[in-house]
């Protein structure tokens, strides 16, 4: 099957026209005609201009303009369309089971991590301790003083170095025997990690007033 370049060249040769001669007749540069016959499309002007050249060449060469245009459209290489690798339209976000799974893992990990941090801080911090009795500089009559307060449930309580039991809520109550030389009540709360909280209260016994 002959191409448009071959058809044009054969028709020109049959007419015994040189490139220069047909160029004079059609007012087309002979270099352009040569390029069309050799079908070197990349060296030629854009397609609309080449189409006009072929239409102008058809009649002097005794060819059908319609057929020549049809052959050109068949043989002319298609235009390469550049596809943007990054489309301007952002992809529509959709929630998927995979995202649900990942979100669940993230929430679980956050809760576990937060719990571990909380336990670590709690383990390494001194225990909470409150002392409701005695008050500072409280006057004590008799030989005993009532000591009560609260701490954390897993802490150990010492009152003037004497171990004291706590209930399930961390509360403690004890009656401490005192002498004339007892001038202070010292309460210590000791955590499992060995951290200590201490509250001391001065007292005044009846014999010291």
Image: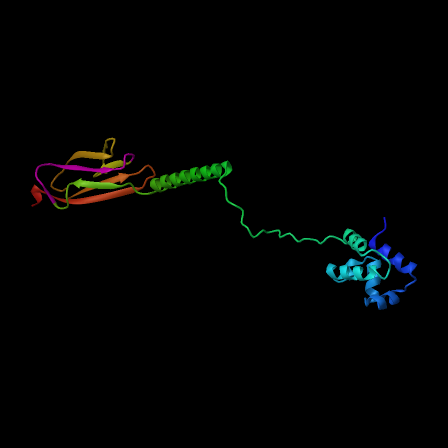
Q: Position of residue 77 (x, y in %)?
A: 76, 53
Closest to the observer, 126 or 44:
44
Q: Is residue 156 magenta?
A: no
Among the 4 quarters of the image, the one containing residue 189: top left
Q: Quadrant of residue 112?
A: top left
**Left or right: 93 in relation to 6:** left
Residue 5, horizontal then vertical, whole percent? 84, 56
Q: Quadrant of the C terminus?
A: top left
The foreground one among 77 and 16 is 16
Q: Is residue 38 above or below residue 130?
A: below
Q: Residue at x 48, y 36 (%)?
A: 101
Residue drawn 20% across the image and 44% down it: 200
Height in image: 1 above or below 15? above
Magenta-colored span: 138-154
Q: Is residue 104 left or right of residue 162?
A: right
Is 146 magenta? The answer is: yes
Q: Nearer the viewer, residue 32 or 166?
A: 32
Judging from the image, the colouring scheme is: rainbow
In front: 31, or 191? Answer: 31
Q: Residue at x 92, y 62 (%)?
A: 16
Q: Give the side of residue 118 with respect to residue 9, left or right.
A: left
Q: Quadrant of residue 123?
A: top left
Q: Is residue 77 left or right of residue 141?
A: right
| Location of residue 169 in the rendering, given as x and y in whole percent from the top left corner | 24, 33
């Amino acid at each position: 099957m002959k191409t448009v370049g071959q058809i044009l060249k054969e028709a020109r040769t049959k007419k015994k026209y040189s490139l220069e001669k047909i160029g004079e007749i059609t007012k087309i540069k002979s270099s352009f005609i040569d390029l069309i016959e050799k079908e070197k499309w990349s060296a030629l002007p854009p397609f609309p201009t080449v189409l006009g050249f072929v239409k102008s060449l058809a009649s002097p060469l005794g060819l059908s303009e319609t057929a020549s245009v049809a052959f050109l459209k068949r043989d002319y290489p298609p235009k390469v369309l550049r596809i943007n690798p990054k489309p301007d339209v952002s992809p529509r976000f959709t929630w998927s089971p995979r995202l649900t799974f990942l979100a669940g893992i993230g929430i679980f990990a956050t809760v576990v991590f937060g719990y571990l941090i909380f336990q670590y801080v709690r383990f390494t911090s001194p225990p909470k301790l409150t002392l409701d009795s005695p008050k500072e500089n409280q006057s004590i009559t008799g030989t005993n003083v009532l000591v009560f307060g609260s701490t954390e449930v897993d802490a150990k309580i010492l009152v003037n170095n004497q171990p004291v039991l706590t209930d399930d809520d961390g509360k403690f109550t004890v009656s401490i025997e005192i002498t004339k030389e007892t001038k202070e009540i010292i309460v210590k709360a000791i955590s499992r990690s060995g951290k200590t909280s201490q509250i001391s209260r001065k007292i005044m016994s009846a014999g010291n007033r």
